[in-house]
Amino acid sequence: MSDILVHAEGGITTITLNRLERKNSITSAMYGAMADALATAEADAATRVVLLQGHETVFSAGNDIGDFLNQPPQGEASPVFRFLRGIAGFSKPLLAAVCGPAVGVGTTMLLHCDLVYAGDNAAFSVPFANLGLVPEAASSLLMPQMMGYHRAAEALMLGEPFFAEAALEVGLVNRIVPPTECNGYAQSQARKLAAKPLSSLVETKRLMKKGQAAPVIQQMTDEGAVFQRMLREPAAREAFTAFMEKRRPDFSKV
């Protein structure tokens, strides 16, 4: 069975992370599949809403580390950057249902969604600094705007999880529901949107986002350049080696 499931019905395209045995960690191929699904939904007149979802126990553990090390992102044409530009520039309503861990890109992709619903077991974390890296998906711009500088700094510098109530308080999620109801509730909200005039929704979204569209793409480009440079530096090599060896990293010499 595919690691990414795409289902279109009633004007709603649902993209499901379906790699539960690996906690929905995302490979290069999965990024490519999601980027393709977003591009298809954007171009398809019958698609009015897109919903991203995982399982009631886990949304995503972030990048698959082994795959990431074997196939690091190589420039703007790489699948991960195609996906990030796809969600940043998606013109139609984009929803997410998030339960359990949402690590790294599992959190940062939500910054580009219009509505986010969380299970009460959701745990968000952006541990890029812990891996010797920097944020991505324009999160270094969008998180301070959403959360305030100090809360964003705590999340991005310490990399420690914050939970559903905190995410609701800062506006990252719209509502908290029981995990077993989360995907269904998000689907019901998507159906409400699909019944509305698409042109009104698209123009409303464009007007709300037009002031930050160019800065978001520029921030993604800047982050990507630094991310790729730091990926080759000693701190990241130590972090990833320690992860693979199941030990604590030692950054005392980097």
Image (cartoon, rainbow, N blue to C red):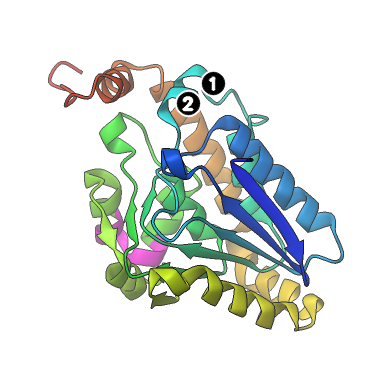
Which residue is situated farthest in the left direction here?
252
Residue found at x 59% / y 53%:
16
At which x and y percent is residue 51?
Answer: 62, 63
Q: Nearer the viewer, residue 53 or 109?
A: 53
Whether tag 1 and tag 2 are in contact, CB under 8 A, the answer is yes
Q: Quadrant of the N terminus?
A: top right
Residues packed near mark 2 inside 10 Å, few (<14), some (14 to 19) or many (20 plus): few
Q: Is residue 173 visible?
A: no
Q: Residues within 10 Å of mark 1 (few under 14, many from 20)?
A: few
Residue at x 35%, y 31% (from the top left corner) = 133
| Tally of numbered tags | 2
Q: Tell me the quarter of the picture where residue 84 sits.
A: top right
Range covered by the magenta-colored residues: 145-152
Location of residue 163 in the rendering, given as x and y in whole percent from the top left corner: 28, 63
Of all residues, the one furthest to the right in this rendering is 45
Q: Which mark is residue 71?
A: 1
Q: Quadrant of residue 45?
A: bottom right
Q: Amino acid at mark 1?
A: Gln
The quadrant in which residue 90 appears is bottom right
Residue 188: assigned label: none
Q: Relative to residue 88, is residue 33 depicted above or below? A: above
Residue under pointer 2: 68
Q: Could you say whether the residue bearing mark 2 is in a helix, strand or loop?
A: helix
Horizontally, is 191 left or right of 179 in the view? right
- In the image, is residue 149 part of the stretch drawn in magenta? yes
Q: Amino acid at mark 2?
A: Phe
Magenta stretch, overall SS:
helix
